[in-house]
Image: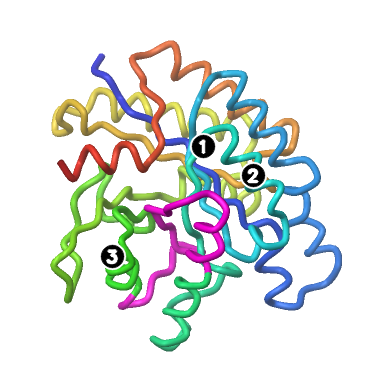
Amino acid sequence: MSEIYVCLTFDFDAESAQIRQDEDPGRISKGQFAIQRGLVRVLALLAKHEIKSTFFVCGWVAEKYPQHIEEISNAEHEVAAHGYQHEYLDRLEFNEEIIVHEHTNQVLESMVGRIRGFRAPYWKLSKNTLTIIAEMGYIYDSSLMDEDRPYVYSVPESPKNLVEFPVEWFLDDWVLFEQHQKSPTEVFEIWKAQFDALQKMEDLKERRKVLTLTCHPSCIGHAYRLNVLERFIRYMKSKQVVFVKMVDLASDYLL
């Protein structure tokens, strides 16, 4: 078996989208589970297994819950950008989108220092998004689905490049647990099957085998779901695996 890198990533959007969309108190409370229970459980699990991860954080969440961002940063996890209030970027005018990115970046950098990565809310990019974040100095994105390995993306209308960490619906806890109500066994087997297959794929070069898992504290933080994640972590640790923050792997790709 060859070595495989694993990026455990967490979209920390809490109730930002529900507030933006003026949803009912019940829907808002679902997002708030990330604040009340989900995040602390995720951080405890990562600490238990000595894993450093990347958290994609909405600027609105950082402003409302600065102590939670401090906890993420103090645990030496990476903080990356995830829109301001979990907007649909593809529905914004160009100037509106620039304001979203610049405001989010300002908020996050005031708390944790330089921000280098981005993931689009809902994985929906506008035709301008990647150019905007590249010009802002970001070095990677994690929103596209055209590959099963990271690659260097040539940014349109810009001399700069981004490292792209592709995502997929079947590697997203929200899709499997919330939308499709998969059982714990089903979710574990899907994630395990992808991990095993990537490790064996002959068209993937060494140091380029990367599994990116997308989770949400408001979803994976529920007790039985957290058990699935820990089971998957234990399984991967029994193989040749290196857990990495996206910013560290992205820097390596750009060398």
Residue 54: image location, x then y, percent? 48, 42
Q: Is residue 196 magenta?
A: no
Q: Which residue is mark 1?
A: 77
Residue farthest to the right? 25
Horizontal placement of 146 versus 244: left or right? Answer: left
The residue labelled by disc 2 is 70
Neighbor class of circle 3 (other Cα within 10 Å; few <14, some 14-19, many 20+) is: many
Q: Is residue 217 above or below residue 106?
A: above
Element type at mark 3? helix
Tell me what residue is drawn at x 15 percent, y 41 percent: 255
Q: Tell me whether the residue at label 2 lies in contact with that at label 3, contact meaning CB atoms closer than 8 angstroms.
A: no
Determine which residue is flagged by label 3: 134
Q: Is residue 125 magenta?
A: yes
Task: State whether residue 214 is above or below residue 188.
Answer: below
Mark 3 or 1 closer to N-term?
Answer: 1
Q: What residue is drawn where x is 51% and y is 74%?
A: 88
Q: Secondary structure at mark 2?
A: helix
Residue at 67% across, 62% down: 63
Q: CA distance from mark 2 to mark 3?
A: 26 Å
Q: Amino acid at mark 3?
A: Ala
Give the amino acid at mark 2.
Glu
What is the distance, in whole Å, between disc 2 and disc 1 at their CAs? 10 Å
Q: Which residues are magenta?
A: 104-128
> x and y percent of residue 218 in the render?
69, 48
Image quadrant of residue 107? bottom right
Which circle's residue, 2 or 1, is located before the other in the chain?
2
Q: Residues within 10 Å of mark 2 (few under 14, many from 20)?
A: some
